[in-house]
Image (cartoon, rainbow, N blue to C red):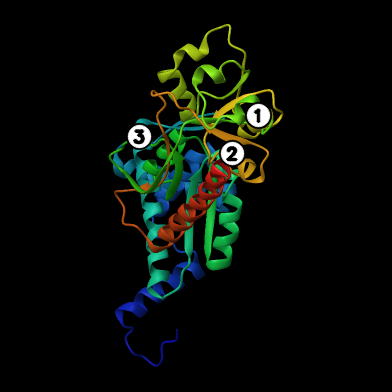
């Protein structure tokens, strides 16, 4: 876009000029003092923050001291080897991170007003997603929307929700989300509770299994950090008797390898094991016990913020790819 002569820019053009200026000059709408406090909190010292920001340590220190004076509070405890946030400092850092999150959202909206699908989306997903549909989804996103950048972190469900609430994530794909005041679920699917076994395993001959039948074999269990393990402990505590033969791991990949070997049975979902189910190295069998409750996979965002176009693009593609994996895995089960 070009501006000719001395004409006053129209409102849309003013926004475009602001966006261009932010990119060219690395301008931030967040006050420098807040950005410096946040960086020092992350780095643990002014010297490390100065190195990361490529700014003189004295300038950062001066801004922080001025902010402390203006607010009338101490933001950091100062030690010989670094700095640690006080309670007041934690409050200020939370504000800084919310502002930075809003700044990114504003930047994305300005780009969208120019008719361009550009922006940056921060996604938190689960370990099983990284082993399944996620690489394919990232490739598809790059092909459809080359101007959109994506940051992906792999965390537990609890960590994903915390990231969304604190503003360090724009979108999450997680299992068994519990209701939360700030959580808005865009898409969800039920996942029958069940287990995976090798095609040659005795249980593979059955269309469904009981918990008693499963526990006749060595079991591979996911760690306590994951929702499916908590479900087992709360609904089927008898599984954890000391005489049971089982292996516990926080690695989904190891869990599936153990099941593929033919010796172990693993409690997990169709989506967790979709690649192996589709290729035929594992089969999924739902648990038929009346107490077996379906698990859920959901895509959610912070309900306190408006849904941006770029976040919706990523959310829709996530849902599309997960639906595709589930459909293909279920066709294998019913074939």
Give how far across and how far down residue 273 sits, in percent. Answer: 59, 39
Q: Is residue 123 above or below residue 154?
A: below
Q: Which mark is residue 259?
A: 1
Residue wearing tag 3: 178
**What's the CA distance linking mark 1 and mark 2?**
10 Å
Marks 1 and 2 in Cβ contact (< 8 Å):
yes
Q: Quadrant of residue 190?
A: top left
> Secondary structure beneath disc 1?
helix
Q: Residue at x 49, y 64 (%)?
A: 26
Give how far across and how far down residue 225 sits, in percent. Answer: 50, 27
Q: Residue at x 64, y 33 (%)?
A: 256
List the single residue furthest toward the right. 261
> Secondary structure beneath disc 2?
loop
Give how far across and how far down residue 187 sits, in percent. Answer: 38, 49
**What's the CA distance linking mark 1 and mark 3?**
29 Å
233 horizontally vs 128: left or right: left
Sequence-wise, the earlier of marks 3 and 2 is 3
- Image quarter where the N terminus lies is bottom left
Q: Which mark is residue 273?
A: 2
- Image quarter where the C terminus lies is top right
From this viewpoint, is residue 49 visible? no
């Amino acid at each position: 876009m070009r501006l000719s002569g001395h004409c006053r820019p129209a409102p849309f053009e003013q926004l475009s000029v602001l966006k261009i200026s932010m990119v060219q000059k690395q301008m931030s709408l967040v006050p420098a003092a807040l950005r410096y406090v946040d960086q020092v909190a992350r780095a643990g010292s002014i010297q490390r923050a100065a190195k990361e920001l490529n700014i003189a340590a004295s300038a950062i220190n001066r801004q922080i001291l001025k902010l402390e004076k203006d607010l009338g509070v101490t933001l950091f405890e100062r030690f010989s080897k670094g700095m640690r946030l006080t309670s007041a400092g934690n409050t200020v850092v939370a504000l800084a991170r919310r502002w930075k999150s809003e700044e990114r959202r504003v930047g994305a909206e300005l780009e969208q007003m120019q008719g361009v699908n550009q922006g940056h989306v921060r996604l938190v997903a689960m370990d099983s997603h990284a082993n399944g549909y996620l690489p394919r989804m990232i490739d598809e996103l790059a092909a459809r929307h080359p101007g959109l950048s994506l940051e992906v972190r792999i965390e537990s469900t609890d960590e994903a929700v915390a990231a969304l609430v604190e503003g360090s994530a724009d979108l999450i794909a997680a299992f068994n989300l519990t209701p939360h005041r700030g959580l808005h679920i865009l898409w969800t699917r039920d996942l029958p509770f069940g287990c995976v076994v090798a095609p040659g395993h005795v249980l593979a001959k059955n269309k469904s299994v009981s918990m008693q039948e499963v526990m006749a074999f060595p079991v591979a269990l996911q760690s306590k950090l994951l929702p499916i393990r908590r479900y087992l402990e709360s609904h089927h505590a008898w599984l954890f008797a000391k005489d049971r033969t089982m292996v516990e791991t926080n690695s989904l990949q190891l869990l599936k390898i153990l099941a593929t070997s033919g010796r172990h049975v693993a409690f997990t979902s169709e989506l967790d094991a979709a690649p192996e189910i589709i290729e035929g190295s594992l089969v999924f069998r739902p648990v038929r016990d009346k107490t077996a409750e379906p698990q859920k996979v959901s895509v959610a965002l912070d309900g306190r913020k408006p849904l941006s176009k770029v976040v919706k693009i990523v959310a829709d593609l996530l849902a599309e790819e997960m639906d595709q994996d589930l459909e293909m895995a279920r066709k294998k089960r019913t074939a």
